Amino acid sequence: MLMHAQIGISKFSLSVFSKPPNYNTMARVWLTAPLTALLLFAFSSAVSSCPPSDLAALLAFKSAVRESNGGIFNSWTGTDCCRNWYGVSCDRNSRRVAEISLRAGPVYTTFEKPFRPGYMSGSISPEICKLTYLSSIIITDWQGISGEIPRCITSLSFLRIIDLTGNRISGTLPADIGRLQYLTLLSAADNVIAGEIPPSLTSVTGLMYLDLRNNQISGPIPQSLGRLQMLSRVLLSGNQISGPIPRSFCEIYRLVDLDLSNNRLLGPIPEALGRMKVLSTLKFDNNRLSGSIPASLLGSGISELNLSHNYLEGNIPDSFGGTSYFTLLDLSYNNLRGPIPKSMSSSSYVGFLDFSHNHLCGPIPSSYSDADASSFDYNDCLCGKPLKAC
């Protein structure tokens, strides 16, 4: 029985494999294989390219600007904006455009014009807002980019960096900029932006760097700016900002640099600024500040202190000590009276020093006899080296 079964199987096997091959079926397989491979290649290429909507938005951005020296947009060719387009970066997974980084300086170093400044005119097209995955917009130092910041920019919910420094951008900052909850850096320095700092900015609690220097911004600093606990640099100099210095600045415990110089600020200097742990640079020069100098500022860890060209009065506090380390200490052009404090000699270091154009009187500490005479000129009755003898 077993032998008959084996013989039956053998006959069955022979009957199957002894049949001639079906050439029509094989031909269909051979024809289908290359077509499948071609379709797979086309599909993978489409997935790895940027989507047509992002491509169209970038081309609209390009058409709204003009780069007189040529070169920067030469690589913006083809349909894949994620591949070798200068200044464009895409997310690896989604292939959506994630960054536009066009800086004038490095461009001309790349094209072997190392000392030639960049120049680009035109404006930032609102079509940029169709790049919904953007996390970084850097368009800096082109000098001629004008027009307003597109209002729709606040719809780009993934934005972390906005840097438009060194152009001719006008208008105002978007009123609803507080919608950008992931924003960590906002820099629009060296433009012609007007209007006030939007109150909604105080809702961007992750903001670390704020630079609006050298614009035409007016009005007060939002009093609740202290809510931005992550801020390390606040640079607002060279504007027309008025009103008092917000006391809430003293609550930003990470703040390292605070520059409010060359504005129209009024009122006293908050005393608590001198108790901030990491504050290193404090520039309030060329304002209309009044009252006395807080004693806490002179014994703090501040290394660059400029209070010149204000209306400060009273004596210079006798509160210097071993923690006083000044690379720059400028109290010139105020209404300060009395002597130079003796405790100043106990400072760890004082580099550039200027007490000129006040009403100080008395001997200059001998430890500063080698200072430049101009540092003490135009006072009521200071004496001793480097001035005339007492």
Image: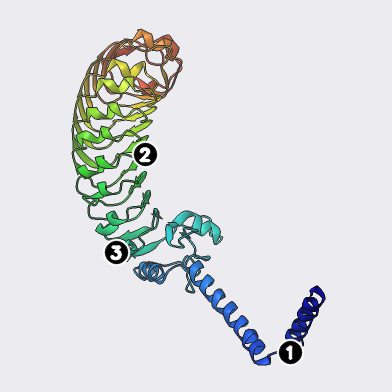
Indicate the amino acid at tag 1: Lys
Residue 277 is situated, as x and y percent measured from the top left of the image, at 38, 22
Most distant residue in the front direction: 1
In this view, the residue in front, 43 or 352, is: 43
Most distant residue in the right direction: 3
Q: Quadrant of the C terminus?
A: top left
Q: Toward which corner of the image does residue 332 lie, by quadrant?
A: top left
Q: Quadrant of the N terminus?
A: bottom right
Q: Toward which corner of the image does residue 33 lie, by quadrant?
A: bottom right
Q: Is residue 166 above or below residue 269?
A: below
Q: Is residue 308 visible?
A: no
Crowding around mark 3 (Cα neighbors within 10 Å: few <14, some 14 to 19, many 20+) is some
Residue 87 is situated, as x and y percent measured from the top left of the image, at 47, 60
Q: Which mark is residue 87?
A: none
**Comes first in the chain, label 2 or label 3:** 3
Q: Is residue 369 above or below residue 308?
A: above
Spatial distance from mark 1 to mark 3, Cα to Cα? 70 Å
Q: Which mark is residue 126?
A: 3
Spatial distance from mark 2 to mark 3, Cα to Cα? 26 Å
Dot 1 falls on a residue whose secondary structure is loop
Residue designated by label 1? 19
Residue designated by label 2? 208
